Image: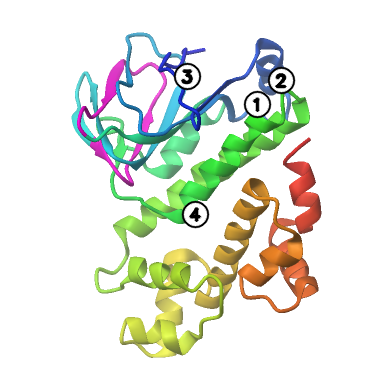
Amino acid sequence: MSEPSSWPLTEKGLRFLAPKFILDHLRENVLTRECYPTAIGYYPNAAGHAMRRDNHDDYLLLYCEDGKGQVSTADFSSVVQKGDVLILPRGMAHEYCADHNTPWTIYWCHFRGQLAQAFLDHIGLDQQRPLIGGIAAPALQSSFKSLMSIARTGYGKKAFVHAANQLRQLLTLLARLQKERRGIDGSFEYELIRGYMQDNIDQGVSLEELASICNLSKYHFSRKYKELTGYSPLQHFTHLKIEHACALLDSSGLSVGQIAFQLGYDDPLYFSRTFKKITGLSPANYRRSDRR
């Protein structure tokens, strides 16, 4: 396994490496062997962070939440800044470091598996340019936070199976966000619409409100939105609410009723039914599953 850096962790920092017996289990388990994490971490305001690898036997996913840094490979060099995603394929020698004046805050994950490269192909990663710029999406940040929660579960095998599937979801989410960033219609203000949804995540929105942002009729807006995301606008808004609920279940001690209220649901039972319909688990079972 490619060793993570030895950057001195701060109070809020995290570095978590899977031990050999867990790696053996993940490599052999039919539920995880296609793609699984080998190490994860979170480095906030990582002044002095730097790494160089000539031999790299994992894949590395790095998300810059804030600040900036620099990355170089044999054929590529670039600044990495807020909202950028860096994916370094296995075998690619590289070096990177935090900016001296504005050091980055990063989430990172080393991973491997039989289909690891296939996930990168699905994202559409350019092997000569392993940087995806400008994906500052709350859903992506929430996915990384959820993945980091494995550090609270110890070394339980079931927890790592769960984390492996969270990683798969994160990679497929990144593929979708990459498609959205490229866009299918330059006149369609998707990021503005998504921002409006996020700003109103604690209440409801109407189709009329969303369509008016693009100066489109409800029919044309719905058609374009579904073509881009695969969901109707209001269905996607509900999914964003549930993504936010998952983040709150992972990171807070709020009750299910309190989370429902924060997301604009007057009826906790209706919220729970919606949550289970989308995730396959009740909110309580989701929270328990994340801690096994």
Towards the viewer: 187 or 155: 155
In this view, the mark in front (2 or 3): 3
Q: CA distance from mark 4 to mark 1?
A: 25 Å
The residue where tag 3 is placed is 58
The residue where tag 4 is placed is 139
Label 1 near label 4: C-beta < 8 Å?
no
Q: Residue 65: where, in percent of width, then height? A: 38, 43
Helix, strand or loop under label 2: helix
Q: Image quarter for residue 31?
A: top right
The disc at residue 33 is 1
In this view, the mark in front (2 or 4): 4
Label 4 neighbour load within 10 Å: few <14, some 14-19, many 20+: some
Label 1 near label 2: C-beta < 8 Å?
yes
Among numbered discs 4 and 1, the one appearing first in the sequence: 1
Amino acid on which the number 1 mark rests in the picture:
Arg
Amino acid on which the number 2 mark rests in the picture:
Glu
Q: Residue 53: where, in percent of width, then height? A: 34, 12
Is residue 281 at least partly visible in the picture?
Answer: no
Among numbered discs 3 and 1, the one appearing first in the sequence: 1
Magenta region: which residues?
80-101
Q: Residue at x 81, y 51 (%)?
A: 285
- In the image, taking residue 290 as reference, residue 141 lies left or right, namely left
